Image (cartoon, helix red, strand yellow):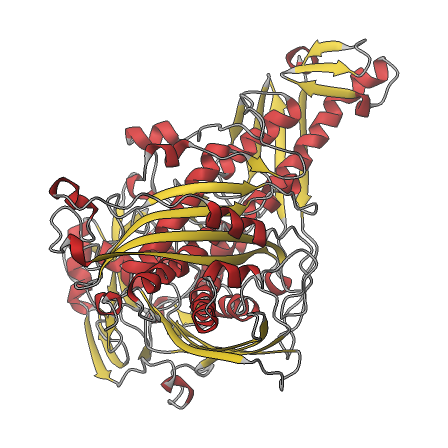
């Protein structure tokens, strides 16, 4: 991306007027991350760097088959190898044999059946990592290979793959008149591929047995309390006997650490009485953790002659893979947002999530919403073409606004400046056309060594609008707890909200600086001895954990100001803290925060819990979500219409963010989200053949690199605060991930005249129509 795109933040419009000059600290400042230096210098403590005296190494034996009956497991050869301390299988799990965050349907180790390629069969602890891997390979497993069910459409009629059946969830949404029709009808069939979260570092962890018979697990968990509870149940221990300590998280776009890595690790430590370390290979990482749901979508849009939507009909089929994971929540988002940020008087949607013998699917940023966005935006392009309307104009005639009603019956009560966002990207100047000269050959799709010819390159421009929910999916209790302590002029924040790269640790420091006027703020490391804060998904920590920190800091502020207010005969509301100084409204009182804190130790604990939601009912109706965020993106692409190669030239982004809390951090989050979406649009697809993952490595799985990242222009940030959210801010990173693949596909359609109904876009789909 260009340098100006990386640093420039546009003026933010909203009720409070244009954005003012940034403060030096507190909310609104571009405060750098506290761990930025350690990460750049290579001293940041990742889980793979951990060590302990008497350390053993773990390795996991995984199934080479997608579907098979396990006839026998012989561990004698592995157990007899020099240096091997123990081997564990399903027979050695002392507690619950299965686990799961929503449905406990996934076995710790396969016992009778293998349901996906890479499923764990056994685990080994040895005194050297090579010994552990050799011992795992020496375990003899006799399989009866079964035909895998890999087509989700065939899963409905296939024999049950699991005792719970093949159907994870079915959501029928009924809204309006089923007999309503439009003058213009367009249909489409769309397929979305399997995107992998591809974390920077593969899964790793260290388990240390405790004298009381429990175990401490050091790992990059993004939901430590849930992971602790799941592990404890499988260990046959109480939650108080298991402690999860969060180590440095090398970024996360979903569930960073699958319990399938942690539970075998803890079992080995309990069995041997020694610390045990697991460092997964990249192949094991691809096979073991969850991916974005591959999705099949059928759509029919009805509109009147002016292009206003009348009815949307859709069928959405999510491939859950072998186990339920987060499929129920992902399906709820897909069905609820199946019509997009548009006013639709009548909607009829059928959504299913089914088990197959494909790799498990789960939380990946924007789950459910991303898949439907690609489909409904393709439908909007079809309508525009059929009606002879500009694609942006068609969208403007249908966009949601505050007060409109979603097809779930839920009223949009938060700010929804969708029209403003679309107008901003539509009106932003287009990038200059590339020059047809040898020195500018790098501008060709395919890069500097691309085989294309300039004469075969066509430029396309496409638009997309996306939306995501932030909290409270179908009654989820989104509570978080935080403690703020002040001593010796320094503040400490204790909160189990995991820093995954979303910036919570920086935000917590800013909140305390803003509330208490204390520059030196430390955010404590996270473990399960602290009260729970919930998972690090959907940007929820900005809202619930940031809200808890703010409430605790305000309680400490009251403790600090009360003695001064009492001394001068006034209420604390008449005192303010600015730039480290405490002053009264009339100027009688003026002192520094440092002086007021001298000799004092103050602390407070607070919770933040958004208003409750409800599950979708039998007709897909209900107030199922707290908070919505919206984004508009205009993509500009160059396509070699002979070779089908695509270069994304520019992504113009406008987003409603509620309030800008850290301008530089916000820009980074948006740019990262857009780039992840470009990967989903063009290159990222974890391919399988009869359920077997092909090339589970970073050579076979094509992540976008810096050379693939387009210029990202953040052309507008609408700062219209959500009054029910702490600080009024909205989650920032998920909605550009949701929107950008649809925008790239729209631009390729514009350049080639092809329908582009599959993501990632294959070269043959980007060849110009005859």
31 with respect to 361 (left or right): right
299 with respect to 336 (left or right): left
Q: Nearer the viewer, residue 20 or 423?
A: 423
Q: Position of residue 305 (x, y in %)?
A: 56, 74
Total labels: the figure holds 0
Residue appearing at x 88%, y 16% in the figure: 569
Q: Nearer the viewer, residue 121 or 593?
A: 593
Q: Quadrant of residue 141?
A: bottom left
Residue furthest front as drawn:
388
Q: Quadrant of residue 473?
A: bottom right
Residue appearing at x 35%, y 67% in the figure: 92
Residue appearing at x 53%, y 58% in the figure: 467
Whether residue 678 is situated above or below residue 600 in the rendered picture:
below
Figure quadrant of the N terminus: top left
Q: Nearer the viewer, residue 516 or 606?
A: 516
Q: Position of residue 335 (x, y in %)?
A: 54, 71
Residue appearing at x 18%, y 53% in the figure: 446
326 with respect to 619 (left or right): left
Figure quadrant of the C terminus: bottom left
Q: Nearer the viewer, residue 351 or 383?
A: 383
Res. 335 visible in picture: yes
Q: Position of residue 617 (x, y in %)?
A: 65, 75
Q: Quadrant of residue 458?
A: bottom left
Whether residue 581 is situated above or below residue 641 in the rendered picture:
above
Res. 218 visible in picture: no
Q: Position of residue 73 (x, y in %)?
A: 24, 75
């Amino acid at each position: 991306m260009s340098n100006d795109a990386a640093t420039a933040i546009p003026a933010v419009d909203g009720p409070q007027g244009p954005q003012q000059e940034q403060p030096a600290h507190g909310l609104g400042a571009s405060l750098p991350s506290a761990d930025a230096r350690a990460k750049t210098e290579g001293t940041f403590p990742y889980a793979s760097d951990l060590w302990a005296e008497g350390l053993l190494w773990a390795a996991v034996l995984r199934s080479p088959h997608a579907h098979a009956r396990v006839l026998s497991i012989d561990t004698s050869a592995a157990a007899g190898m020099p240096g091997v301390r123990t081997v564990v299988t399903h027979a050695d799990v002392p507690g619950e044999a299965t686990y799961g965050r929503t449905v406990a349907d996934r076995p710790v180790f396969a016992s009778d059946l293998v349901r996906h390629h890479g499923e764990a069969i056994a685990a080994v602890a040895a005194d050297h990592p090579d010994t552990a891997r050799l011992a795992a390979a020496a375990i003899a497993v006799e399989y009866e290979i079964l035909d895998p069910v890999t087509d989700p459409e065939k899963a409905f009629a296939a024999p049950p793959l699991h005792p719970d059946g093949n159907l994870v969830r079915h959501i029928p949404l009924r809204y309006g008149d089923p007999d309503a029709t439009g003058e213009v009808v367009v249909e489409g069939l769309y397929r979305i591929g399997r995107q992998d979260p591809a974390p920077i570092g593969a899964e790793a962890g260290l388990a240390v047995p405790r004298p009381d018979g429990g175990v401490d697990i050091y790992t990059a968990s993004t939901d430590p309390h849930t992971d602790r509870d799941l592990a404890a149940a499988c260990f046959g221990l109480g939650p108080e006997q298991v402690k999860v300590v969060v180590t440095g998280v090398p970024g996360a776009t979903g569930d960073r650490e699958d319990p399938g890595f942690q539970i075998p690790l803890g079992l080995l430590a309990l069995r041997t009485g020694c610390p045990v370390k697991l460092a997964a290979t990249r192949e094991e990482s691809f096979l073991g953790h969850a991916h974005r749901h591959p999705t099949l979508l059928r759509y029919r849009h009805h509109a009147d002659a002016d292009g206003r939507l009348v009815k949307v009909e859709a069928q959405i089929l999510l491939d859950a893979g072998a186990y339920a994971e987060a499929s129920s929540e992902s399906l709820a988002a897909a069905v609820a947002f199946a019509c997009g940020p548009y006013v639709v008087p009548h909607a009829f949607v059928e959504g299913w999530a089914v088990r197959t013998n494909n790799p498990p699917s789960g939380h990946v940023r924007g789950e459910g919403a991303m898949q439907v966005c690609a489909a409904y935006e393709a439908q909007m392009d079809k309508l525009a073409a059929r009606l002879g309307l500009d694609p942006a104009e068609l969208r403007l005639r249908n966009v949601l606004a505050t007060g409109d009603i979603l097809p779930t019956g839920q009223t949009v009560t938060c700010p929804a400046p969708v029209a403003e966002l679309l107008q901003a990207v539509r009106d932003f100047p287009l990038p200059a056309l590339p020059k047809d000269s040898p020195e500018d050959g790098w501008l060709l799709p395919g890069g500097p060594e691309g085989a294309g010819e300039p004469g075969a390159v066509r430029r396309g421009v496409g638009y997309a609008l996306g939306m995501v929910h932030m909290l409270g999916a179908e009654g989820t209790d989104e509570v978080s707890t935080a403690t703020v302590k002040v001593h010796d002029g320094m503040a400490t924040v204790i909160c189990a909200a995991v820093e995954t790269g979303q910036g919570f640790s920086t935000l917590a420091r800013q909140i305390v600086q803003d509330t208490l006027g204390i520059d030196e703020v430390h955010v404590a490391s996270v473990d399960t001895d602290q009260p729970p804060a919930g998972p690090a998904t959907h940007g929820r920590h900005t809202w619930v954990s940031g809200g808890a920190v703010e409430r605790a800091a305000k309680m400490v502020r009251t403790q600090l100001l009360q003695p001064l207010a009492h001394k001068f005969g006034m209420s604390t509301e008449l005192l303010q803290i600015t730039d480290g100084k405490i002053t009264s409204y009339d100027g009688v009182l003026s002192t520094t925060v440092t002086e007021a804190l001298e000799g004092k130790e103050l602390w407070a604990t607070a919770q933040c819990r958004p208003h409750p939601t409800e599950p979708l009912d039998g007709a897909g109706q209900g107030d199922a979500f707290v908070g919505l965020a919206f984004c508009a993106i205009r993509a500009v692409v160059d396509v070699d219409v002979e070779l089908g190669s695509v270069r994304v030239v520019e992504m113009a982004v406008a987003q409603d963010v509620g309030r800008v809390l850290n301008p530089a951090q916000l820009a980074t989050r948006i740019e990262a989200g857009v780039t992840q979406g470009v990967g989903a649009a063009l290159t990222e697809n974890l391919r399988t053949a009869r359920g077997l993952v092909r090339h589970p490595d970073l050579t076979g799985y094509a992540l976008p690199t810096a050379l693939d990242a387009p210029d990202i222009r953040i052309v507008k940030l609408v700062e219209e605060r959500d009054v029910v959210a702490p600080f009024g801010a909205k989650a920032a990173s998920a909605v550009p991930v949701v929107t950008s693949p649809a925008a790239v596909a729209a631009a390729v359609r514009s350049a080639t005249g092809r329908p582009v109904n599959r993501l990632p876009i294959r070269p043959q789909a980007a060849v110009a129509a005859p």
